[in-house]
Amino acid sequence: MEKINNVTEFIFWVLSQNPDVEEVCFVVFLLFYAVILLGNLLIMLTIFMGNLLKSPMYFFLNSLCFVDICFSSATAPKTIVDLLAKNKTISYEGCILQLFGVHFFGSTEIFILIVMAYDNYVAICKPLHYMTIMDREKCNKMLLGTWVGGLIHTVIPLSLVVQLPFCAPNEIDHYFCDVRPVLKLACTDTHIIGGVVTANSGTVTLGSFVILLISYTTILVSLRKQSAEGRHKALSTCGAHITVVIIFFGPCTFTYMRSDVTFAEDKMVAVFYTIITPMLNPMIYTLRNAEVNNAMKKIWIKKIFWNANSK
């Protein structure tokens, strides 16, 4: 198949064609993105200032916050600009780059959530062997594995999309470049490619969700053997993780477990896993996770008092 590209740019339909609605969305998206940046950076700064990276839980939480910033930044800045722009366009190269960012950072976040679930499992079910199992070398390897896994997942749909010819129309019924909306614009039959993409994304999404469900079910069952204080501490940590998993995987499963079918609700569903989840993660981990919450209070109160005394 000879690749002939008559398309040099794509046009987004964004979230609404109503200028008044777009202005409201602009304010909301700008606020959400600011919360994403400030919230995740605050947690990362707390972990760094508190010298908490030596703890596997904080080591992986720091990575999750970083990926959340990257994941949301793949779509949010462009969307915010487009909401007030007259011409909501993106170049072909920019579209491919955005597609890469969404899938790479999105799948890496999924794998980090799995690693965090494993960390919780070892901490609660095998506490005496925790430091041996979760030593720094193994944590580094697991984190590297999440990035490599994200890259492998992303290369598959990306290598298929870049080979497709595009002619006309060039209007994407979405607010960012994702595989399914882009495939609809190709000047060739994409049923086989669509099936491969669905199998790839579906395996990562559903497979990871099942693994996480099994992991946290095992953890919750094992809590019966814990003391009341141990159960409270474990539920505090696991509750935060389970909340994040449900919020993230619900919309992802709805979007990526289908074949070539698209719905009008896809754009709104995508808002949940590209904007709302990265925004809620810092709140969930600071409000629902007592250990993180206490660490933040201790570090920042100490910092405030130190600054006050130094004056």
Image (tube, grey):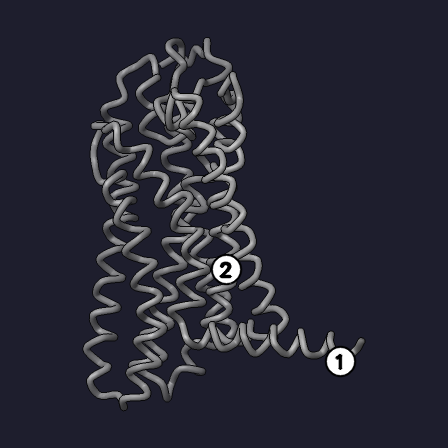
Which quadrant holds the N terminus? top left
The number of callouts visible is 2
Which quadrant holds the C terminus? bottom right
Q: Residue 173 bears which disc, if any?
A: none
User: Is 201 drawn above or below residue 142 in the view shown?
Assistant: above
Q: Position of residue 106 (x, y in %)?
A: 40, 46
Q: Residue at x 52, y 25 (%)?
A: 84
- Looking at this view, is 112 or 231 the one in front? 231
User: Is 43 drawn above or below residue 292 in the view shown?
Assistant: above
- Looking at this view, is 36 or 49 the one in front? 36
Query: Which three-letter amino acid code belongs to the residue tagged 1?
Result: Asn
Q: Residue 63 bears which disc, if any?
A: 2
Q: Nearer the viewer, mark 1 or mark 2?
A: 1
Q: Position of residue 76 (x, y in %)?
A: 49, 38
Q: Residue at x 44, y 77 (%)?
A: 291
Q: Residue furthest bottom?
A: 227
Q: Position of residue 181 (x, y in %)?
A: 33, 25
- Looking at this view, is 262 or 3 the one in front? 262
- Label 2 element class: helix
Q: CA distance from mark 1 to mark 2?
A: 33 Å
Q: Residue at x 29, y 63 (%)?
A: 242
Q: Residues within 10 Å of mark 2 (few under 14, many from 20)?
A: some
Q: Residues within 10 Å of mark 1 (few under 14, many from 20)?
A: few
Mark positioned earlier in the residue sequence (1 or 2)? 2
Q: Position of residue 45 (x, y in %)?
A: 60, 64
Query: Which three-letter amino acid code belongs to the residue tagged 2?
Result: Ser
Left or right, 309 with reference to 99:
right
Q: Residue at x 40, y 28 (%)?
A: 21
Left or right, 264 with reference to 103:
left
Residue at the spot of label 1: 309
